[in-house]
Image: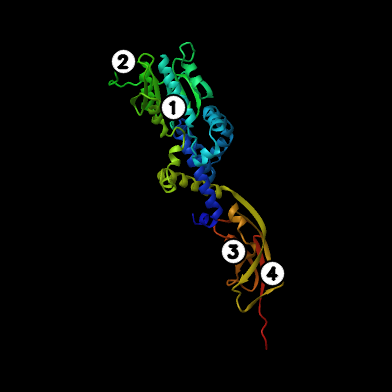
Amino acid sequence: MKDLLKLFRWQDGLDILILTFVFYRLYLWLRTKRALRMILAMLALPIYYLLARWIDLPLSVWGLQNLWAVILLVLVVIFQQEIREVLGRITLPSFFFGKPERLPSKRLDEIVEAAFKMAQQGIGGLIVLQKEDDLDEWIHGKIPLDSELNEEILISVFHPQSPLHDGAVIISRDRIRYAAAILPISQSLSLPKEWGARHRAGLGITEVSDAACIIISEERKEILVVSGGKAEKKETREDLKRSFSDLPLTLGERETKKRWPGRILEDLPVKALLLLLVCLLWGVLIGIRQGEISFSIPIEYYSMPPHLMINGEPPREINVRLKGSQRLLSAVNRDRLRVQIDLSNSHPGINQLSLSQTHINVPSGITVTNLYPQKIRLQLSPLPRHP
């Protein structure tokens, strides 16, 4: 741990914060998706792969390396709907900064006008306004439209002669996303007896999600707004519009209404966990990125007995090969490396000295894999006596 802290730079801190922010934005986008649990399970594979490399498990590393292509293909197949949504619907500002894509007032007017015209003409309808929760896991039999949101299209969809009139229309942002969608039926026993399948479906989708629903009754020619499992009758256009004017109808709009200090403290346990995971990822990646370098370093002799001297020219340098983290190796100062040989136990004549890593002042976290030569010979003789 101390060795890793020595390698920490301000660039690493910036890198960790950026990656934590990206992971948090992904979490915010995915937490309403069915895919989140599967993605969390899939994250165990790369984490295990990094750990297997760290502690040197060759079979696990080999198996995971050969499975990556299959895993990526499976991910694309499983999450094709989510990938399509990211590429086609989510903009970079909304993903990274949570900028709202509000339902324009003009589009809301189109919905309100269509609802009252349908009520006047005795056309039944069920309009679901998607907010933050993903509705794909609750609706079935849906027909993708992805069409412009306007009054004429809404009325034509619910016209009794239209093949799409049965079921609900799902509005996401300012587009009609699906038609003929089958919604979950409310099982509440306290509903009015006159409520049919359309009313129960409109109430049911609001019980399992944060969506709002407009129910147009063809028999009573009335309009109900259902939200949070509660229904309220609307008599005028202004009253209906006010029901949705203050609601966040797109992903991330609630976040933008909060001030920065509040947003920083929001989801603090999740952010702390993501920060910890990114820090662990940084430590593992820095640790497993091993490298090797070799060069020559000088020899220093010390503690020579005062009555002895070296005959001839002793070896002045040796070739060493060092192994360790690439970050540590890049920080090695070659000018400070020395082979230090203690001659305090030497004796007159030929001294054969074996060299090892203990003779080299390498930084912590770096090992010496090879020395050449591994032994040196010194010829020592007594100093001449002066008469």
Sequence order check: which comes first, mark 3 or mark 4? Answer: 4
Q: Given this view, does label 1 or label 3 mark the residue nearer the observer?
A: 1
Tell me the colour scheme of the image.
rainbow
Side (left or right) of 67 relative to 252: right
Q: Which residue is mark 4?
A: 314
Disc 1 residue type (three-letter):
Leu
Residue holding disc 1: 129
Q: Earlier in the sequence, mark 1 or mark 2?
A: 1
Position of residue 238 measured from the top left corner of the image (x, y, whole percent):
40, 28
| 238, above or below 318, in the image | above
> Which three-letter amino acid code belongs to the residue tagged 4?
Pro
Q: In 3D space, how far apart are the residues under numbered discs 3 and 2 (Cα atoms)?
A: 93 Å
User: Distance of mark 4 from mark 1, alpha carbons?
Assistant: 87 Å
Q: Estimate the spatial distance between the alpha carbons at disc 1 and disc 3, rounded to whole Å.
A: 74 Å
Residue nearest the viewer, comparing 349 with 225: 225
Residue 363 versus residue 247: which sits nearer the camera? 247
Disc 3 marks a residue whose amino acid type is His
Q: Nearer the viewer, mark 2 or mark 4?
A: 2
Read off the residue under disc 3.
359
Please tell me whether mark 4 sits on a helix, a strand or a loop. loop
| In front: label 4 or label 1 | 1
The CA distance from mark 2 to mark 4 is 107 Å
Question: Quick one: SS at disc 3?
Answer: helix
Amino acid type for the residue under numbered disc 2: Glu
Residue most extreme to the left: 190
Residue 242 percent coordinates (x, y): 39, 31
Query: Which residue is situated farthest in the bottom direction here?
Result: 387
In the depicted structure, whether residue 384 falls above or below residue 264: below
Instruction: Please identify, in this view, whether the residue under mark 3 or under mark 4 is nearer the observer.
Output: 3
Place of residue 207 in the rendered image (x, y in percent of width and height, measured from the top left)? 36, 26
